[in-house]
Image (tube, grey):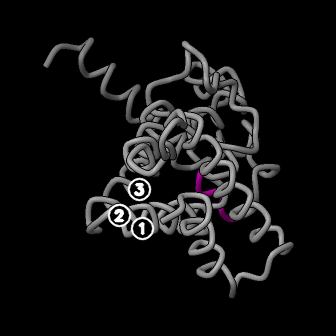
Amino acid sequence: MSVQERKQRERASRERLIVATARELAKQQGWDAVTTRRLAERIEYSQPVLYSHFRGKREIIGAVALQGATEMAVAMRAAAAAADGPRARVTALARAYLAFAERHPAVYDALFQLDGGLAYAREDTPEPLKDAFAALLECLSEVAGDGVRPELFTETFWASLHGLATLTRAGRLPPEDTARRTELLVNRLAML
């Protein structure tokens, strides 16, 4: 292995450490606790080393969001693939989405609540975000209905899931009714 390859591998390893540490700190104490100073202390590198990877907290949030989008897409696809029939697939997809939001609130915030400097719904949207939307679209396009653009239906269904996830987490909706809300969403919006 050349010196250049070793340096690239070490750099990638440091970057993964920074992102993992930011995720863990945000999970434990919230995103307000994630500062470059605190991250530098936790990973035992100087702040200039951290800044050589990310220009600041905003880019770190973006990196967490991209990682989270990849994980969410995998979870939704796995759930939908394990189900049989359109109704079961859409229900599994919705449950997987809501479960991800509940299990990974800091990552969900990085994806959808915080400014990570990422473009959404544009030509320059990063691939992991496009892929997460594609995971929704793959499942939901088969139930969009006649005369309805699958992308528009997917955006509307996604917005409903996001609202359920956000309002439940904020204590505005009782969590014990999550399954019933999911069924209602699938039955009425997807008309299954």
Disc 3 and disc 1 in contact, CB within 8 angstroms: no
Tag 3: Cα neighbours inside 10 Å, few (<14), some, or many (≥20)?
A: many
Mark pair 2, 1: CA separation? 5 Å
Give the residues drawn in magenta, as a range. Answer: 23-28
Amino acid carrying label 1: it is Ala
The image quadrant where one finds the N terminus is: top left
> Residue most toward the left?
1
Residue 81 included in the magenta stretch of the image: no
Q: Nearer the viewer, residue 50 or 30?
A: 30
Query: Where does residue 139 sit, x and y in percent of width and height?
Result: 39, 50
Q: Are marks 2 and 1 in contact (CB under 8 Å)?
A: yes
| Circle 3 residue | 76
> Counting other residues with Cα less than 10 Å from the Cα at mark 1, is it few (<14), some (14-19), or many (20 or more)?
many
Q: In the rendered structure, find residue 92 and report the number of the disc placed on it.
A: 1
Q: Is residue 155 above or below residue 24?
A: above
Measured as percent of width and height from the top left, residue 170 is found at 83, 68
Residue position for label 2 = 79
Tag 2 and tag 3, C-beta contact below 8 Å = yes
Q: Residue furthest bottom?
A: 176
